[in-house]
Amino acid sequence: MTIYRSANMADGAAVDAALAKAISALQQGEQVTQLTRAQLNEAAAENALLQGEPYLITDELTLAIGTSVNGYVTMTAVSPESSSDAIKIAIVSALPGTPDANTLYFVTG
């Protein structure tokens, strides 16, 4: 499985560990913290982030993963034709009857 993410990474090993932890939590149906980019940046400035914690940036509909108490990376969207095994992110008001494979669903309703 390939994970596509933004390029703002300082330590690849820490990012990979954080992503693995976040993906595991999401697959187990754990709640995702929802906040704006400004709130996320404020939490990072206050050393209040958790490594491996997924954060949904609501004003951008972007997924961020905490890499340390003051750092995070964002996952980028990919087009379906760019890779058949890429994880896709879907922001929906209700789960579809038949969910797509390799898709992380964030239900807002």
Image (cartoon, rainbow, N blue to C red):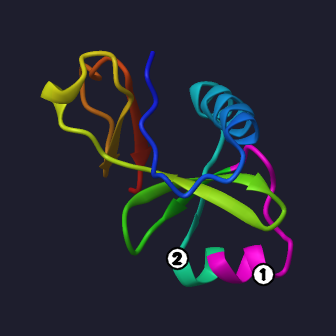
Q: Which residue type carries mark 2?
A: Arg
Q: Residue sitting at 52 percent across and 77 percent down? A: 36
Give the quarter of the image for residue 29: top right
Residue 86 versus residue 53 in the image, above or below: above
Judge whether residue 52 is colored magenta: yes
Residue under numbered circle 1: 45
User: Which of the labelled discs sits on residue 53, or is there none?
Assistant: none
In the rendered structure, the answer to whether residue 58 lies left or right of residue 51 reads left
Give the quarter of the image for residue 82: top left
30 and 37: which one is in front? 37
> Considering the numbered disc 2 on the image, is that residue within a helix, a strand or a loop?
helix
Residue 33 versus residue 39 in the image, above or below: above
Marks 1 and 2 close (CB-CB < 8 Å): no
Residue under numbered circle 2: 37
Q: Position of residue 11 (x, y in %)?
A: 72, 46
Residue 106 versus residue 46 in the image, above or below: above
Judge whether residue 23 is colored magenta: no
Disc number lying in front (1 or 2): 1
Q: Earlier in the sequence, mark 1 or mark 2?
A: 2
Q: Position of residue 1 (x, y in %)?
A: 45, 15
Q: Which residue type carries mark 1?
A: Ala
- The chief SS type of the magenta part is loop
Give the quarter of the image for residue 39: bottom right
Residue 41 versus residue 72 in the image, above or below: below
Disc 2 crowd rating (10 Å Cα; few below 14, some 14-19, many 20+) is some
State the CA–CA distance, disc 1 to disc 2: 12 Å
Q: Residue sitting at 72 percent across and 63 percent down? A: 71
Q: Position of residue 105 (x, y in %)?
A: 40, 38
Q: Position of residue 109 (x, y in %)?
A: 38, 56
> Considering the numbered disc 1 on the image, is that residue within a helix, a strand or a loop?
helix
Specify the segment rendered in magenta.
41-53
